[in-house]
Amino acid sequence: MSLNIVLFQPEIPQNTGNIARTCVLTGSKLHLIKPLGFSLDEKHLRRAGLDYWPYLDLTLYDSYEELREKYKDGTFYFSTTHGGHYYDKAKYKDGDFIVFGRETCGLPDYIREQNSDTCIRVPMINTTTRSLNLSNTVAIVAYEALRQMNFPVMK
């Protein structure tokens, strides 16, 4: 099974393409929650994913609620600059979901508030900039989760 990467209403096709490539090369599944800020046919998205796109395990959802309904018993972590725990302190296991917000505004307040105990963050210095690039953050958190699982399917 491995890891589930969830993008909540992603806006930038190049980020999603890079994340798709990371998912393919780590055996992770990518879940995209609509609305998307781009078309899945957009050439920038495919270019960023290069020739990996046909190998991507991808599922689309009309809403966050649809995803949660489908995986009622799943363990979900929420990556946010407002997270109360560092990403490396979570105890990841096979099949877990890690949810990442929009590039411009992150996850909605209601999602963070409903899941405050599983909100995680990548530490950064205090600056006037918002945060790391989404595709970089996904790679950092995903590889920590996979490291904790002893890199399943990557041996």
Image: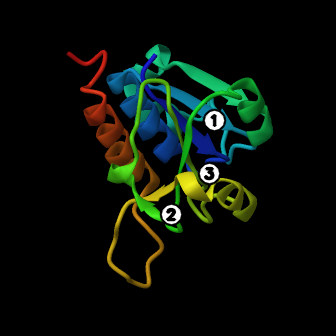
In the image: residue 66, left or right of residue 48: right
Which residue bears the numbered disc 2?
A: 83
In which quadrant is the C terminus drawn? Answer: top left
Q: Which amino acid does label 1 sit on?
A: Leu
Identity of the residue drawn at 71% across and 64% down: 109
Residue 40: quarter of image:
top right
Give the alpha-carbon distance from disc 3 to disc 2, as whole Å.
21 Å
Identity of the residue drawn at 75% across and 60% down: 110
Residue 129: quarter of image:
bottom left
For the residues labelled 1 and 3, say whether their Cβ atoms are less than 8 Å apart: no
Under tag 1, what secondary structure? strand
Give the alpha-carbon distance from disc 1 to disc 2, as whole Å.
21 Å
Q: Where is residue 56 in the image (x, y as percent from the top left)?
A: 48, 20
Identity of the residue drawn at 61% across and 59% down: 116
User: Mark on residue 76?
Assistant: none
Which residue bears the numbered disc 1?
A: 32
Which residue bears the numbered disc 3?
A: 11
> Which is more N-terminal, label 2 or label 3?
3
Q: Where is residue 142 in the image (x, y as percent from the top left)?
A: 37, 39
